[in-house]
Image: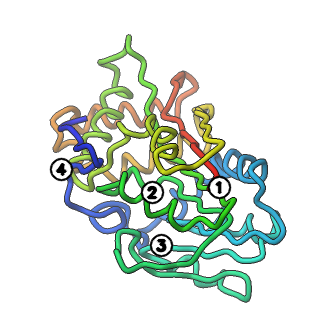
Amino acid sequence: MAGSPSADGAAPGGGHYGEDLFAPWEPREAERVDAAALVYDPVTTRRLRALGAGPGSRCLDVGAGTGTVARWLLEEAGAAEVVVLDRDTGALEALAGPRLRVVTADLTDEGLRPGRFDLVHARFVLMHLPQRRRLITRLAGWLAPGGRLVLGDALEVPDALDGSSAYRRTMDAMWRALRSTIGTDVSSVPAYPHFLREEGLRDVAAELVVPPLVAGGPLARFWAETWNRMRPALEETGLVDAAVVDEALAYLASPGLAELGPGMVLAWGRRS
């Protein structure tokens, strides 16, 4: 990816997820987000249950998207209270009720005080934000004693032997375009366990999950819709042209698809 992050994770892109790219009101945006949720929700919820999310828990879901994890916390885990926090909560208002509170706010707002929680969860959020290291400090500060912070973000696992295929070139163009437009940066994701230890959390651990990338499957649909939505930005990188993107999209839908796509790192720790 172009450029280098600062020690605090700042990146050159000055835009915002949901404004400069992937606006929630755009056609098919909810379907794009839900396609990824179909793949990653089972991974996330299995880990949250193993970490003790259950009856009586007070939970904060940051960057809640369409609310799939929040609904699981309420309906399956039986949490006592779930707070969902996002800059755009249009898709979440219908979930509001006695046990679910919707907070429309920017995580970077210094005045934000949502409370103290037994679980703070943020998935595919920090990677899109500047000063992400400081934001981890903020999230850890919202933990009640014994509470768990669970962070999930993307990590690319590229094939070092493939630098020229349409798939590889388009994926590389995507990361560069995300970096230059909205500041997305996954280079510090492997350091999340260290960051959690620096916050004084205990029982720190992490896992990398790389779900199968199958033609016609939800993850292939997610990447195809993402690339289609980003076409102008992809071509502006100079790494691909329209023909290369078309070839990559056809490959995602073909029986010959055989890639180890980007995965998700989950890192967690417990407040003493």
Q: Residue 129 location, x and y as percent?
A: 34, 57
Label located before the other in sequence (1 or 3): 3
Kindly indicate the quadrant of the structure image that contains residue 191: top left
Residue where numbered disc 4 is placed:
12
Between marks 1 and 2 in the image, the one whose residue lies nearer the viewer: 1
Q: Quick one: SS at disc 4?
A: loop
Please name whichever residue, 105 or 15, is drawn nearer the observer in this view of the structure.
105
Please report contact status of discs 1 and 3: CB closer than 8 Å, yes or no.
no
The nearer-to-camera label among 1 and 3 is: 1
Label 1 SS: loop
Q: Residue at x 26, y 46 (%)?
A: 179
Ranked by sequence position, the earlier of labels 4 and 1 is 4
Q: Give the quarter of the figure containing the N terminus.
A: top left
The label nearer to you, 4 versus 1, is 1
Q: Residues within 10 Å of mark 3 (few under 14, many from 20)?
A: some
The disc label shown at residue 272, or none: 1
- Residue 86: which disc? 3
Left/right placement of residue 48 relative to residue 188 reads: right
